[in-house]
Image (spheres, rainbow, N blue to C red):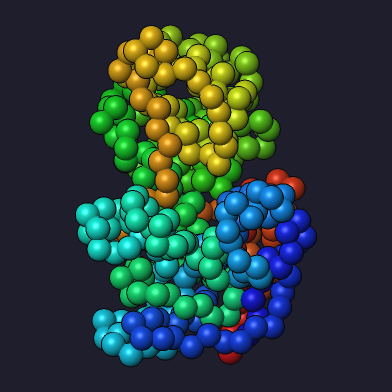
């Protein structure tokens, strides 16, 4: 079968011929109908040799932690899925036995790292292929009648902002203001989720007028350039005072300066972007009652809820489709910031 693999650190991924995998006991094989390209993949492929070795990811590695497909074959002992059933892969996998996993919060499994359990495409072979193996059917979420290519990105680009927003839902009451920084693959879905779940006024910030217009298209009440003047523009438009929550899908020092100007007592500062910043915390280091959170992905029940939002038409993902053969171009456009939403790879399997 064909697969898009990261073969050599620092080099672009390659389309390669690899053996079609066979499911072992308890495993499920999917015929992939769509796979999503994500900034997390681009981040991994930007690491130096030393940085990459610290992650311990094998090479070559088939990319793709956003995946949907149909059940193609099952291993011994698997009885609770149906051949031909359309499903989505739940990516942040845990041990399946601890309290967090029993609650569906495998994204916070405390044992996954020690057990060597990693997401597909981020430590083991993922969905950028004609077929993939899923280790346990519990990790498969029914897709139902949702279009695979239009909705595959919801497994991360939908689930991650949904989980982040759910953590602040108690603050997003009538009259509150929520700010989304970065209206890209995740941010444009976050705007829609905020509009669907909350009565908050939604303000979007980004670096280009094109992205600001995109934010307005998907439901932002206001959209401003993400610069030093942004806090003043927000105050002028929605009134002075702290915002209820800031959802940062960028996470760098300049963005943190904006967040700190927007924050006040009880503000949630939610850092979702794959970056790292330093700031003072504690009673005298941040506004009273404020929270700084770094949520990771989301839970299995939340992914089901995201699919219901999509099924009801309240949430959708802006997608650009690529064939598996053109998948390297999808990652090039992702790296160069040339995508409006998400890149989706659609294998053509007979």
Left or right: residue 113 versus residue 343 is: left
Left or right: residue 165 versus residue 119 is: left
Task: Identify the image quadrant of residue 38.
Answer: bottom right
Task: Residue 45 in the image: state x and y as whole percent.
Answer: 68, 55
Q: Is residue 329 visible?
A: no
Q: Is residue 24 visible?
A: yes
> Farthest residue in the right direction?
11
Question: Is 153 located above or below residue 215 in the figure?
Answer: below
Question: Is 348 located above or below residue 128 in the figure?
Answer: below
Left or right: residue 291 versus residue 131 is: left
Left or right: residue 250 versus residue 309 is: right
Work out whether residue 148 or residue 216 is closer to the camera in this orientation and state it: 148
For the N terminus, the image quarter is bottom right
For the C terminus, the image quarter is bottom right
Question: Is 2 located above or below residue 57 in the figure?
Answer: below
Work out whether residue 301 or residue 105 is closer to the camera in this orientation and state it: 105
Task: Residue 301 in the image: state x and y as whole percent.
Answer: 28, 57
Task: Identify the image quadrant of residue 161.
Answer: top left
Q: Residue at x 40, y 41 (%)?
A: 295
Task: Identify the image quadrant of residue 58.
Answer: bottom right
Q: Residue at x 45, y 42 (%)?
A: 190
Question: Is 220 located above or below residue 42 in the figure?
Answer: above
Task: Residue 223 in the image: state x and y as whole percent.
Answer: 55, 28
Q: Residue at x 30, y 53 (%)?
A: 105
Number of numbered discs on residues: 0
Q: Residue at x 47, y 34 (%)?
A: 271
Task: Residue 47 in the image: state x and y as whole percent.
Answer: 68, 49
Work out whether residue 54 or residue 37 is closer to the camera in this orientation and state it: 54
């Amino acid at each position: 079968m064909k697969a898009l693999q990261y073969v050599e650190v620092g080099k672009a991924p390659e389309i390669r011929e690899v053996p079609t995998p066979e499911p072992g006991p308890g495993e499920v094989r999917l015929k992939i109908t769509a796979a999503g390209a994500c900034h997390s993949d681009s981040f991994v492929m930007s690491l130096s040799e030393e940085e990459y070795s610290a992650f311990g990811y094998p090479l070559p590695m088939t990319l793709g932690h956003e995946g949907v497909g149909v059940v193609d074959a099952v291993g011994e002992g698997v009885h609770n899925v149906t051949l031909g059933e359309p499903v989505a892969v739940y990516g942040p996998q845990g041990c399946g036995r601890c309290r967090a996993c029993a609650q569906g919060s495998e994204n916070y499994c405390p044992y996954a790292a020690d057990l060597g359990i990693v997401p597909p495409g981020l430590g083991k072979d993922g969905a950028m292929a004609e077929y993939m193996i899923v280790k346990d059917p519990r990790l498969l979420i029914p897709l139902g009648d949702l279009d695979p290519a239009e909705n595959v990105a919801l497994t991360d680009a939908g689930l991650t902002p949904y989980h982040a927003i759910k953590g602040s839902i108690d603050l997003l009451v009538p009259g509150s203001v929520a700010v989304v920084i970065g209206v890209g693959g995740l941010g444009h879905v976050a705007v829609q989720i905020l509009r669907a779940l909350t009565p908050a006024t939604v303000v979007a910030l980004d670096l280009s007028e094109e992205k600001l217009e995109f934010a307005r298209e998907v439901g932002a009440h206001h959209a401003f350039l993400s610069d030093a003047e942004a806090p003043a523009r927000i105050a002028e438009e929605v009134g002075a005072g702290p915002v209820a929550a800031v959802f940062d899908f960028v996470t760098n020092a300049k963005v943190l300066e904006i967040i700190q100007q927007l924050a006040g007592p009880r503000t949630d500062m939610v850092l979702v972007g794959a970056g790292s910043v330093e700031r003072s915390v504690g009673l005298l280091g941040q506004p009273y009652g404020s929270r700084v959170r770094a949520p990771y992905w989301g839970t299995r029940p939340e992914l089901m809820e995201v699919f219901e939002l999509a099924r009801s038409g309240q949430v959708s993902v802006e997608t650009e489709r690529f064939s598996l053969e053109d998948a390297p171009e999808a990652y090039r456009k992702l790296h160069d910031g040339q995508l409006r939403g998400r890149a989706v790879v659609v294998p053509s399997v007979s």
